[in-house]
Amino acid sequence: MKDSVGSSQANSSGFVRGLGLWDATMVVAGSMIGSGVFIVSADIARQVGSAGWLLVVWIASGLLTVAAALAYGELAAMMPEAGGQYVFLREAYSPFWGFLYGWALFLVIQTGTIAAVAVAFSRFLGVLVPAISPANWIVPPIDLSASYAVSLSTQQFVGILMLVVLTWINTRGLALARWIQNVFTSTKTLAVFGLIVVGLIAGANSGAIRANFAAAWVPHGVAAITPDLGFVPSVTAASGLFGLVVAFCVAQVGSLFSSDAWNNITFAAGEVRDPRRTLAIAMAAGTGLVVTLYVLANVAYVVTLPIAAIQHAPDDRVATAALQTIFGGAGASIMAVAIVISTFGCNNGLILAGARVYWAMAKDGLFFRATGRLNRHHVPAVGLVLQCVWASLLVLPRTRLRDVGGQLVRDAAGAPQYGNVYSNLLDYVVFAVLLFYILTIAAVFVLRRTRPDAPRPYRAFGYPVVPALYIAAAAVISAVLIVYKTQTTWPGLAIVLTGIPVYFAWCASGRRRASG
């Protein structure tokens, strides 16, 4: 498939500017909507304990996401180059900070998310095709240590196959990948809208509404939030204002990262038509659309299900539980189809965007040189393949699950149960990702001071108040995570810090090539 005539000319970087406003908006929305909105509300409900606070968590994360997108719009309009956030950090601070972000993106943030979405795709496809199962082994688990194993189930195999297919599609050029993105994003947006309409009209019932809104702000059935630091007391959302604030901040992790990846369109800025205008509008429109859908979906949940049913939805599949109250047994299949479509489109956008960051890093001499070359279809094929290989490898390792007493968790037949390493890695980098967001939005202030005369076709909405409020809110959430989720905070920092020796090694290699 060839790019349209109006966008077929490669720009100076070699990329084809084939993404218009609609396409860019579909990348934003499509990269955001995966499986999170259908699942994470169960965990949020257990943390905050009431329908009112559940909705406020989603509203707050939506406002934070839109505020961040509006600030990024100024940076994207100033520097409409492939690489996006990597470029922003490089120009505002130094190549070192840009590299640390790009390194973490390749190592875990982008590839770990791609792996997680791929397995979510195959997991829900397994609802429709039972042979696709986490326990239907092609290669049974091979224990590597007391904590880790590797395996290849049919579920893992289908997830990897999805990555290979989407990567191949993306190596064939922007036009085909753009078409896939537009079709699947439009379809899954309609699917979420359908869930909302069905929930609000057919699912709404007086029993759930009365149970949820008679005491909408009173937490009950809440989980204790136990800090990893022994001298800090455990709290719950029901233990006073401080406990409620802690629970609210911890709950933001699920909703914020269900809304994440909206910035991926900046990675592909080199392929956007009229990027100085298009990028800011696409991020504002895409994030606005998705956060509105997310809030309304949760309204549908709380008018269909009592808060206790949301908290204890089987496997946390809140959307499935809501549809089953309306359609009975068919609800699980309907939801599975919606999530299969959603995750396929989500991963297409993530795969498309991620390789552009590695391309930009390679052009700066900070990544493998081959990833800085475009193929005859004007896309970074080597970067796409490298990303696919690493994401596929992240699908294979397993954690050996243990109970609170340290004993291996086993099923009814006595077989040990396994988790997924990428799930742990994503938990670990939550804190690091927030720090990079804070640094990037602070770059708006830095560049206003250091480059006051730079062209700014779009200026951050509400500057300086709105960006400052985002930084303050994200800093509070980060501080709570340091204290109450220490064990999943320091490994994230460690993953980022592994980039320090790698950065200096690449710099030294570059100097040797220059002198030779």
Image (cartoon, rainbow, N blue to C red):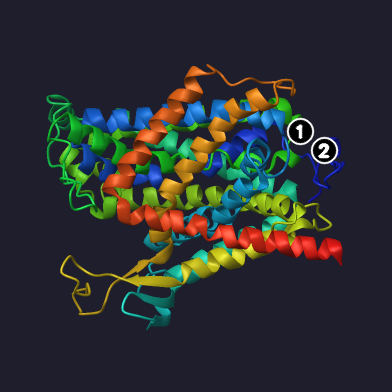
The kind of residue tagged 1 is: Arg
Report the front residue among 428 and 176. Answer: 428
Return the residue at label 1: 273
* 86 lies left or right of 123: right
Q: Position of residue 80 (x, y in %)?
A: 72, 34
Q: Position of residue 1 (x, y in %)?
A: 78, 51
How many numbered circles does the render carry?
A: 2
The kind of residue tagged 2 is: Ser
Q: Position of residue 444 (x, y in %)?
A: 59, 28
Q: Which mark is residue 7?
A: 2
State whether residue 21 is above or below residue 364. Answer: above
Name which residue lies at 65% across and 50% down. Answer: 352
Report the front residue among 33 and 59. Answer: 59
State whether residue 298 is above or below residue 513. Answer: above
Q: CA distance from mark 1 to mark 2?
A: 8 Å
* 454 lies left or right of 207: right
Name which residue lies at 74% across and 20% down. Answer: 453
**First in sequence: mark 1 vs mark 2:** 2
Within-10-Å neighbours for mark 1: few <14, some 14–19, many 20+: some
Q: Position of residue 169 (x, y in %)?
A: 68, 57
Q: Contact (CB < 8 A) between labels 1 and 2?
A: yes
Quarter of the picture holding the C terminus: bottom right
* 328 lies left or right of 170: left
Mark 2: secondary structure: helix
State whether residue 439 is above or below residue 101. Answer: above
Name which residue lies at 18% across and 28% down. Answer: 209
Mark 1: secondary structure: loop
Residue 307 visible? The answer is yes
